[in-house]
Image (cartoon, helix red, strand yellow):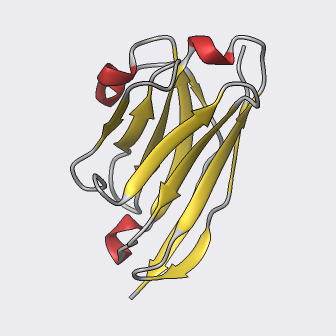
Amino acid sequence: QVQLVESGGGLVQAGGSLRLSCAASGRTFSSYAMGWFRQAPGKEREFAAAISGSGFSTYYADSVKGRFTISRDNAKNTVTLQMNSLKPEDTAVYYCAASASSAGSARNWIGGYWGQGTQVTVSS
């Protein structure tokens, strides 16, 4: 069982930055790939970024590549999403997820563990 708690969301102007954090419970954190997903109002949830259990491999949606950076600290059971050059279209609820599947398949993750989400609002 893994419990995930996100933090760090808020309101920011376009071009600004935010740093999201996800704290995980459990003693097997490094055995899970971790990902960030987002859901905008009226839209389906979409993949944003994922990282392998070791932290050596990262994956990004084209829409965030070059602007967002995912990282993890297995000693602290945390995963972070650094978001720079934010755009109004990045406005969404952001969810942290843990999966026993590979990070490379994050776009197709089914099941796993999910946090409650944190709101990110980017004003123009």
Residue closer to the observer: 72 or 50 = 72
Q: Residue furthest left?
A: 62
Which residue sits at x=44%, y=49%? 69
Above or below, 79 relative to 83: above
For the C terminus, the image quarter is bottom left
Q: Residue at x 56, y 66 (%)?
A: 18
List x then y, in percent, for residue 64: 31, 55
Q: Where is residue 9? Give x, y as percent.
A: 62, 63
Compared across the picture, whether 30 is left or right of 16 comes to: right
Name which residue lies at 41% across and 20% down. Answer: 110
Image-based side of 28 in relation to 70, left or right: right
Q: Quadrant of residue 23?
A: top right
**Rendering coords of residue 54 (x, y %):** 52, 18
Position of the N terminus, as image quadrant, is: top right
Q: Quadrant of residue 105?
A: top left
Q: Is residue 72 above or below residue 120?
A: above
Q: In this image, 74 relative to 111: left or right?
A: right
* Residue lying at the far front of the rendered structure: 56
Residue farthest to the bottom? 124
- Tally of numbered tags: 0
Residue drawn 32% across the image and 70% down it: 89
Residue 43, horizontal then vertical, whole percent? 33, 55
